[in-house]
Image (tube, rainbow, N blue to C red):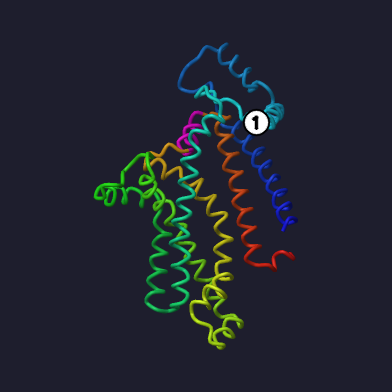
Amino acid sequence: MLRIIISRLTQGILVIFCLLAITFVLIRLMPGDPFTGEKSHAAHIIEKNRENFSLDKPIPIQFGVYLTKLTQGDMGDSPTREQKVSTIIKHSFPASLILGICSMIVAICIGIPAGVIAALKKNSLIDYGTMVIAMIGISIPSFVIGPLLASYVAMNVPLLKVAGWGDPFDWILPSITLGAMTGAYIARITRGGMLEVINQDYIRTAKAKGVSQFNLIFKHAIRGGIIPAVAYVGPAFAMLLTGSFVVETIFQIPGMGQHFVTATKDRDYFLLQGVVLLFGTLIVLANLAADIALVLLNPRLREA
């Protein structure tokens, strides 16, 4: 187990470094810079600002300066907001993280039970109906589900709001909006995994020995049946975090999405770099957690 964790961490660090380097270069290849936006400044002021942020140096030297500050815990300052990037992230990231976690909980609570039930009722109306609903969930994007929930649910349920992030009730509709598509994918994946396990010889043997349906499912089948879904959860959680930008805009959530969009528009190199670094790190950690869960569920992977 320790060898697997160390291997995955090493790979993750390499991935983060490559992501950081590629993003650093691509951002600086965009036309303009943070000081050539809509507000006009004198040429000498622009030049001074570029010098203060090391933008007058070649890209390799800029990257070296950025890495040096990063190792000291400094993600740089945002030229357009006149704040430290770490401060901006500190205030906005918790909302995006809560939204991502709640959305994943919604997806798992919907997807795994639906997939298990569909597999147990193979080729029945329940199976067909569940998979049709799952396909609909996959096909409808969040920017359609969100306004529909806001219009037809939030307007008729007193505890739910169309926008805001003040109390846990405000988390419900955005979490459903963001988690619906992932839950639909998990349902289909879980169904396939359960069908494969149910047809295994050891399940038939247990059934022939008179093992109850409950024990057959929860003690023998489900552990192997949800392995494909667990493998999907890691990348899916990362997708939920990065895909929350649209949902945050729809429900006016003060998360990272607003900063990612405005930083791109304003060519705020340091804020954009900080957001990419944060989400890249979260993707690596989510995949690491999924790999550890897979090893715990399938001991044969420990020998790989």
Residue 189 is left or right of residue 302, and the answer is left
Q: Residue furthest bottom?
A: 208
When the figure is inspected, residue 67 is found, relative to residue 17, above or below; the finding is above
Name the element at disc 1: loop
Q: Give coordinates of residue 259: x percent, y percent.
A: 48, 34
Residue stretch in magenta: 256-266
Give the prevailing secondary structure in the magenta stretch. helix
User: Where does label 1 land, which residue?
Assistant: 73
Q: Inspect the magenta stretch and tell me whether residue 304 lies in it.
A: no
Instruction: Give the residue type that dot 1 points to.
Output: Gly
When the figure is inspected, residue 25 is found, relative to residue 177, above or below; the finding is above
Q: Give coordinates of residue 38: x percent, y percent.
A: 45, 22
Near-viewer residue (54 or 239): 239
Near-viewer residue (159 or 135): 159
Q: Give coordinates of residue 218: x percent, y percent.
A: 52, 72
Near-viewer residue (278 or 15): 278
When the figure is inspected, residue 35 is found, relative to residue 122, above or below; the finding is above
Count the numbered circles shown.
1
Residue at screen point 65% across, 31% down: 73
Within 10 Å of disc 1 (Cα), the crowding (few <14, some 14-19, many 20+) is few
When the figure is inspected, residue 198 is found, relative to residue 3, above or below; the finding is below
Q: Give coordinates of residue 162: x percent, y percent.
A: 31, 43
Q: Residue 64: which quarter of the image?
A: top right
Q: Inspect the magenta stretch and tell me whether residue 259 lies in it.
A: yes
Q: Residue furthest left?
A: 156
Residue at screen point 64% across, 58% down: 291
